[in-house]
Amino acid sequence: MLTFEDYNGLVIYPAHQIAALTPFTHGLVRGVTQDGQVLHRVGFPDPGHWARQGPSLVRPSLLQDNRDPAGFHHPGQPEGTEAPPPPHDARQILTPEGWHSDDGLQPADFQQALQDPALIRIHDDLYAVKSRLRRLDLNHRLTLDNGRQVAQLSRYLAGQLRRRLGHADIQMPGFHQYQLRDWPQELNQTDGEQLRAWFSQPETLMGNLFLQTVRFPNPDYGHDHRGYWYDPVSSCLMRAEFIHEPQLRYHSKSKACEAYHLMLHRIIFDLRLFNFQDLHFNDPGRRLLGSHVVLLTEKGCLNDYAEQIHRRFGFTILISGGSSKLIDAEFLARALHQEGIDQIILLAFVDWDPAGRDLAEAFIPQLQRYEIQVVRGPHIVVTPECFTEKEISLHSYPAPASTPALKTQARRWMEKGGGINGRVRGIGADKLKPLDRILQRLEQMGW
């Protein structure tokens, strides 16, 4: 008897009904049942019931042309033989009334019957034959292999039963939320009808597509946000009818692309399931490696000056761009770690406005995600004091406040000392030119 999980709770199967057990990821094992269900568990069981075939344990009698009932191929030939299945146990549960079986109620000495090793206690005077258990769902309803519900448990009693069954809970990030698993074929080569049968939410499709890319790399897939959107993400989403042809075009502000970027951020930053490097994204570059003092700029306005600033002060300079700053943080962190740097001071050459401040502050947890600690900063380089009154008159602008979120952002910025002359106005970092003014400003800051 083995315990597994699917996305609706705990699933219990006799060993002889498991066609194949195969390594998955994060210490998990993929199980395929004789009726084609794909389930997962923590670690391999004792191999005595199966033959070994490649990395898998299989029951050859349940495979056809080396494919299990879910369609996964198992190359090679089985080594050893599978154990024969035990005879069917017609008994289902035991109560003081006796045995409840496939053939109805059969009287029994309750206390004597309790000694039967096939039993497991459910609660009070209710016991079940372990081989007949099938599911303990998320609502703690316990059912048998014939679909009969035998108990509605409390959360506490459900937890007790899981422990009696010896079940180890799956802790893989995102496993349940995004129904992550292996598939018997490449999702990017799967037709729309099958994708629609497998996936009911675009986030689930994208999460599984990301994981499949990590586990089974395809060199033809895109290697940056834009390229990966075009191949494989958007084509899969369109075949599954989650997006339509006008949404195929990559535009970072479109709803479809925003959902794509949000899902990447969720999987990589929040859940830490894998990295951009695991997705085989290219290093975006745009940096000069130097000291533990990191100068972040949000625009290309320092492109022409970066090398000179680098030579003058020895800073590490990152010109962040593109659709995600998280990928910049990942590759910068890797480069810093290679130099033995894991603590930095952060300077930010960003616009003097709410968005610029937020970008600088958001970079800190992104670096922390990759074990770089910001011990000081962010120190904002461009402030109103850098400009003359005429420049402020010519180039300052009202901070965006067209939505409730932008109004809140602007209010928080003002509370942190933002604005110009007490007004909710900003000014662009690209207005601080030429280079001499930037160098002078950095010197005034003590660098």
Image (cartoon, rainbow, N blue to C red):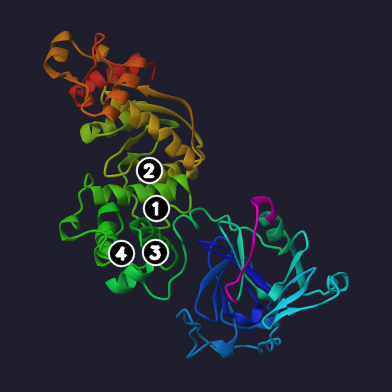
Image marks 1 and 4: residues in contact by CB distance under 8 Å: no
Q: Which residue is mark 3?
A: 213
Q: Which residue is mark 4?
A: 221
Q: CA distance from mark 1 to mark 4?
A: 13 Å
Label 1 Cα crowd, 10 Å radius (few <14 / some 14-19 / many 20+):
many
Upstream in sequence: badge 3 or badge 4: 3
Q: Quadrant of residue 141?
A: bottom right
x and y percentages locating residue 259 in the rendered image = 30, 49
Query: At numbered mark 3, what does the secondary structure look like: helix, strand or loop?
Result: helix
Q: Quadrant of residue 227?
A: bottom left
Upstream in sequence: badge 1 or badge 2: 1
Label 4 Cα crowd, 10 Å radius (few <14 / some 14-19 / many 20+):
some
Tell me: residue 194, above or below residue 34: above
Name which residue lies at 33% across and 54% down. Answer: 282
Q: Which residue is mark 1?
A: 276
Q: CA distance from mark 1 to mark 2?
A: 9 Å
**262 or 52, which is in the foreground?**
262
Upstream in sequence: badge 1 or badge 4: 4
Q: Indicate the amino acid at tag 1.
A: Phe
**103 or 152, which is in the foreground?**
103
x and y percentages locating residue 326 in the rendered image = 37, 43
Residue 190 seen in this snapshot: no
**173 or 365, which is in the foreground?**
173
Q: Is residue 154 covered in magenta?
A: yes
Image marks 3 and 2: residues in contact by CB distance under 8 Å: no
Q: Quadrant of residue 185?
A: bottom left
Upstream in sequence: badge 1 or badge 3: 3
Image marks 1 and 2: residues in contact by CB distance under 8 Å: yes
Upstream in sequence: badge 2 or badge 4: 4
Q: CA distance from mark 1 to mark 3?
A: 11 Å
Image marks 3 and 4: residues in contact by CB distance under 8 Å: yes
